[in-house]
Amino acid sequence: MLEDTSWHAKMLAAPELATGDELLARGRAEAQSIKLGTNAFLRDKRVASETEYKRRLTSEGRMMQHAHIGFRDVGRTVDAMREVHDTCAATGVRIDRFGITLDWSMGYPAEAREGKPNGTGIILSSPEDFGQITNAVPVATHFGDFMLGFPGSLENARGAIAAGATSLGNLGQYFTFRMPYWPDDISPTEATVQAMGLIVEQEAEILIHSNLDDGFAGMFVDTACGLGMAIVEKYIIETLIGGKLAHCFGNHFSDPVTRMAFHGALTRVNDTPGTMIYGNTVSYQSKGEVNYASLATYLLPDILSLRRWKSGHAINPVPVTENERIPDTDEIIAAQQFAARLTELAEPYERLTNWDEVDALSDRLVEGGQAFADNMLSGLADWGVDCQDPAALMLAVRRMGARRLEDTFGPGEPGVKRRPLVHAEWALELERKAEIWVAGQGGANPAYAGLTVCIASSDVHEHGKHYVARALEGLGLTVVDAGASTDAEDLVACALETGADILAISTYNGVALDYTRRTMAALEAARSDLPVIVGGRLNQIGTQSNSGLPVDVSEEIDAAGALACDSLDMVLPLLDRLSDG
């Protein structure tokens, strides 16, 4: 028995939440009027769903290729899809699925988007927009991010299903993404479960997609807990709801052995075909063509894994300019052609792979992951959570958060400081990077010991925040973590309440300037001149942009009164000035 706490009573209980049965029934009722439509892919491939197509290719020993695409304008996106598809086909390269880069404002209901911050992706405002995308080319359309898991989930699902899309996500984001200036967590839960009721009532199989790296698995320090989260998600979607859950992973896996072992472990806990193995974009730390080395280091292990485990995943060759800007069509084409050729050359490298090492690590991941899942479900049940109700269970898991879940239910002896069974690579890499940077500054500086920095991320991406926090702690500062997807006004309030000397913002999703301006306005309203530093992906689509591509806004951030930082070195003069004062 886990000890009951007042925290549980306040945070996990949600009497205002409708039951999962009620929500699923509402979603199923929608299926009377919302039917799965057809599109260019379904007609051309003569299949009822992408799942059927995946199984066909797997039985034929063929591997799928996935390309991500999406500009702000629907028409430009359609034209780009045609250009990429047709150019690749002319050179003998087959693209099987397009992932559409949707804007994060798609998470809001359409009527609530006005005045909310936008990112850099495409906004589908009508059923016709969805249909234009799915009929652009005879390729499976994957609507992943910002579809499910949000207040706008039900209307998103309606539009995608009517357009014949049979792969919708992203369940992982339900647990981690919070829409800015959205007041509650009940409505996203109810909308998501209703949408899944609509999905499971369709005649064809529609994959409910979850990118594990976008969910809690991407925040856990123990990769085994990440696999455990996959087990819990499968229980919710397939056992409780009756859907089909397709997992994706890969963003944060650099080590080829761990990447392959996780793939193997995932096939043992989920036999539904996967969507794709995402590119290890964190390894893109150079510019341009140099990143082809990084592309090969993750793509070859994925190809070898798929030759061994017929999991249905598509390979995902991310364009080498991904870490600089939104890739254009020629860069997407080049990456796809590279992947096709590498697939042709891969077979001899199987003999160089130590499959015994890979399998042994898979065993550890499965054992630890199952322990984490079992601990979580039994522990939450002990606290009074109805683990037979998908809505109640989803909300409880979301409210606990990644850190508390891992600390409470991770594999190992309760009450003992747990060491990760398989230390997450992103955490090791960022902590090492921070240590190296601190050592380059001569270690901790006693003059900084009295300084406090309050840090938050403008969106769900926590890794930049994690790196900056570890580095500044190493210099001797006290770090107050204001969380991820934190509204600017809440960040300012936290900084002022904790007596911070500096406010630090980590940003990624193309809202750098808007978020900075909101922060500065909140400080002005509070009559505070607290210094603000902003780092990360310092870009945004301009209001007068003709290209739909984001541009660097560092100068505008500086003009707004903050300090735009492209490296931590730029923070040092500010720390010196504050410590002298």
Image (tube, rainbow, N blue to C red):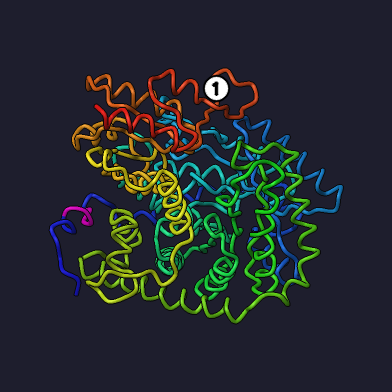
Residue found 55% across the figure and 50% down from its top: 282
Question: Is most of the magenta stretch helix, strand or loop?
Answer: loop
State the residue lying farthest toward the front. Answer: 442
Looking at the image, which is closer to me, 319 or 227? 319
Residue 13 lies in the magenta stretch: yes
Query: In the picture, which quadrant includes the C terminus?
Result: top left
Asked if residue 197 can be seen in this view, the reply is no
Relative to 196, residue 542 above or below = above
Residue 256 shown left or right of residue 489 in the figure = right
Residue 572 lies in the magenta stretch: no
Looking at the image, which is closer to me, 456 or 40? 456
Which x, y percent locates residue 56? 72, 67
Residue 479 shown left or right of residue 249 in the figure = left
Q: How many marks?
A: 1
Relative to 494, residue 414 above or below = below
Residue 447 shown left or right of residue 171 in the figure = left
Residue found 54% across the figure and 54% down from its top: 251
State the residue lying farthest toward the left. Answer: 6
- Label 1 sits on a secondary structure element that is loop
From which residue to which does the magenta span run? 10-14
Residue denoted by label 1: 542
Relative to 74, residue 91 above or below = below
Residue found 23% across the figure and 56% down from its top: 12
Q: Amino acid at mark 1?
A: Gly
Relative to 107, residue 280 above or below = below
Residue 116 appears in which quarter of the rendering? top left
Which x, y percent locates residue 578? 28, 29
Query: In the picture, which quadrant includes the N terminus?
Result: bottom left
Residue 374 appears in which quarter of the rendering? bottom left
Give the crowd class for mark 1: few <14, some 14-19, many >=20 residues within 10 Å. some
